[in-house]
Image (tube, grey):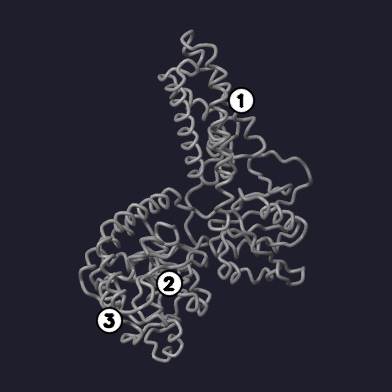
Amino acid sequence: MGELGINNFPRHVLVNVPSPYSRMIPGVSAVPGSRPNPRTATTPTAAPAHQKMQAALLNRLLLPHPIADPWQLYKQVAADLLVLYVVAEAQARLLPGWSLHGHSLPLFVVLITLFAFSEGVYRNPSDPFSAATAAGLARSVLFATALTVVADGDAIGIRSIPATLLSGLGSLLLYRRFRLAWARQRQNSESRRVLLVGAGRAGRSIATTLRNDPLHHAVVCGFVDDEHPLSPDVLGRVEDLDWLARGEFIDEVILALPGEPDRTRAAAEIALRNRLDIRAVPDLPPGPWTDPAISLIGDVPVVTLHREPVPSAALFLKRLLDLGGAIAALILAAPVMAMVALLIRLESPGPVVYSAERTGAKGRRFRCHKFRSMVTNADHLKDDLRIQNQRAGPIFKIVDDPRITRVGRWIRRYSLDELPQLWNVLCGDMSLVGPRPHPVDEVNHYELHHYRRLDVKPGITGLWQITARHSPSFDLNMHLDLTYIENWSLRLDVRILLNTIRVLFSPEGA
């Protein structure tokens, strides 16, 4: 939106932050503080063997089922507690003779979740309705009801016991059915992109299972294999994994090469270098493997070798900040938006809001909305004006663009043309803070290392907009975007938003 001088922005945000991707930008030296080399880093003194064994035993007793993403577990438990309490409270108020007493409800719902955890219901939080879930929930509700009845003694009527069992189990099963239906609806928009290394029997079986099960939220992009011929499914060889990971926006690699340790190790090293989640098919004899460290995709056992840390709680808070900020901004800016729409309509014929396809996170395309600031045939005139482009790299920008209308020049000066993008924020296509969304034709001219900026949602404002907006250097733009991505935090988002609000009243050209 507005611009704040690059020398005035807090220096540690621009310089003294780790940005390992700086080395990918030509002419820009790596910023100090990048990730140390694991081969040269100093390792701490190893703890005695008996202490490690005691710690491992304690962890296994306290948490018998490894949790890959604790935030998913927290959300599942919180949802179950909320559903159970709302249903039990409603039953107590509407049918007091057929329910537990109000003071027993907190104990009842907590006991159910504790028993459910011991029954393994939460072993895989991303799968809310596995085959064993109904039986585990039934036992959990039964045990919790029995203990609550014993604790209350004769105060609970006999008819409330079956009613409580039915309502408790029914509410949990209905919620999971609803979550399953919701998962099917959002499978295409929020799926993880998976690449399989190995197009043999194991890889094909995993791909079939992932494609047929919406609860995995996975899109199988294809295979990498050195033996099978290239095809629409087999995208390349192991040595191609570097550029495939970036060009296909891969989130996870599954190594399905049992019995081939050399190629498996080579693929794992490439995937680790690209910060991808890694799972592998172990070289095991056939059998029913029930160890919690081994999971099954269909009938193929897999083990997790590496999982990139995801700040799920912070991302959830970022989404809340986006929703709250967008709603508040739309309410406050409604009179200004109405005035801008009227001025556009009075000046020239055509739509008030210009919607164009943009490239968002993971290369997904969406319709980005802006107030129309150009003539209606601006897109057709763009190719004729490319020779006058004043921006280095694939981005198109000229100062005195003849396509801009008089009203358009004024609303761009104060960044009012971007207000409709608050609707994109509400829809989840954009965030308040992030790299700007580029047109599809400009993204098509990206080099491979530029695709890193598409790992996150685009934003209305960002680090580049408030520090170096008028710079013609695409490399500087990319450097600032990657610096933001590598050092993202809620605190940084808030600081950028506050600086954006402060400079909104400074008339800066867009």
Tell me the quarter of the image containing the N terminus: bottom left
Along the polypeptide, which appears first: circle 1 or circle 3? 1
Res 139 label: 1
Question: x%, y% of residue 288?
Answer: 75, 40
Res 406 label: 3
Mark nearest the camera among 1 and 3 is 3
Note whether 183 is above or below 225 in the view shown: above
User: Considering the numbered disc 3 on the image, is that residue within a helix, a strand or a loop?
Assistant: helix
Note whether 254 is above or below 449 in the view shown: above
Seen from the viewer's position, the closer of residues 331 and 264 is 331
User: Considering the numbered disc 1 on the image, is that residue within a helix, a strand or a loop?
Assistant: helix
Q: Which residue is mark 2?
A: 22
Q: Does residue 1 appear anywhere in the picture? A: no
Along the polypeptide, which appears first: circle 2 or circle 3? 2
Question: x%, y% of residue 18?
Answer: 39, 64
Mark nearest the camera among 2 and 3 is 3
